[in-house]
Image: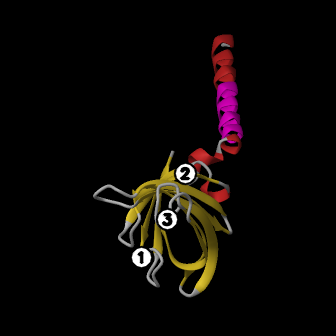
């Protein structure tokens, strides 16, 4: 009789400990349970742009474009961004090539991205390298299209780390 009661007590204690561990670790590690945000598409309206011509006059390796944009959905501003693009190659067949770094600010947090690509209005992809707030711990891609035109937009797709 004592053996059955001891087994029941041990099993009950293990169940309580297991339940407590689930509650504690669920609070400590909420990011693992957070769903990946839905894709976001925003219209990009150029706000400020500065083109810096370093080295020889005209387009040259090392020249820099610095920019900020207003981001909107359905005509309502939902955020803004800031970024820098360095010209890294101007002589190749697929040039000019830029290395760009971008930070997007939404109410829920920031998204950081970067990429190397042909400086063009054609769509190109940037890698999401991190974020803050709602976007902390996420990765993914941003497709940028229509750069510096009225049709410029970002299509943001997320993935878990």
Q: Give the spatial CA distance, label 2 vs label 3.
A: 12 Å
Residue 42 visible here: yes
Closer to viewer: mark 2 or mark 3: 2
Mark 1 element type: loop
Residue at 39% over, 61% down: 96
Q: Quadrant of residue 118?
A: bottom left
> Would you call the spot at circle 2 few (<14 residues within 10 Å), some (14-19), or many (20 or more)?
many
The answer to whether the residues at label 2 and label 3 have Cβ atoms under 8 Å apart is no
Residue at 44% over, 82% down: 151
Majority secondary structure of the magenta segment?
helix
Residue 130: in magenta span: no
Residue 46 in the image, given as x and y percentages of width and height = 56, 78
Magenta residue span: 12-25
Return the residue at label 3.
38
Q: In which quarter of the image is residue 13?
A: top right
Return the residue at label 1.
146
Closer to viewer: mark 1 or mark 2: 1
The quarter of the image holding the N terminus is top right
Q: Earlier in the sequence, mark 1 or mark 2?
A: 2
Q: How many labels does the image show?
A: 3
Residue at 65% over, 11% down: 3
Direction front: furthest residue? 56
Residue 18 in the image, given as x and y percentages of width and height = 65, 31
Above or below, 77 relative to 136: below
Q: Earlier in the sequence, mark 2 or mark 3?
A: 3
Residue 131 in the image, given as x and y percentages of width and height = 61, 54
Above or below, 23 relative to 98: above
> Would you call the spot at circle 3 few (<14 residues within 10 Å), some (14-19), or many (20 or more)?
few
Q: Which of marks 1 and 3 is nearer the N terminus?
A: 3
Residue 81 in the image, given as x and y percentages of width and height = 61, 68
């Amino acid at each position: 009789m004592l053996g059955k009661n001891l087994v029941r007590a041990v099993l009950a204690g293990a169940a309580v400990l297991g339940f407590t561990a689930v509650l504690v670790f669920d609070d400590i590690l909420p990011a693992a349970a957070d769903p990946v945000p839905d894709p976001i598409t925003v219209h990009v309206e150029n706000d400020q742009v500065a083109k810096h011509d370093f080295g020889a006059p005209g387009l040259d390796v090392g020249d820099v474009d610095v920019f900020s944009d207003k981001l909107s959905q359905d005509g309502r501003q939902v955020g803004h961004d800031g970024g820098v693009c360095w010209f890294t190659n101007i002589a190749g067949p697929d040039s000019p090539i830029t290395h760009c770094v971008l930070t997007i600010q939404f109410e829920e947090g920031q998204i950081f991205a970067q990429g190397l690509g042909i400086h063009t209005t054609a769509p190109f992809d940037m890698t999401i390298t991190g974020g803050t707030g709602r976007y902390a711990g996420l990765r993914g891609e941003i497709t940028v299209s229509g750069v510096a035109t009225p049709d410029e937009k970002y299509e943001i797709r997320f993935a878990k780390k």
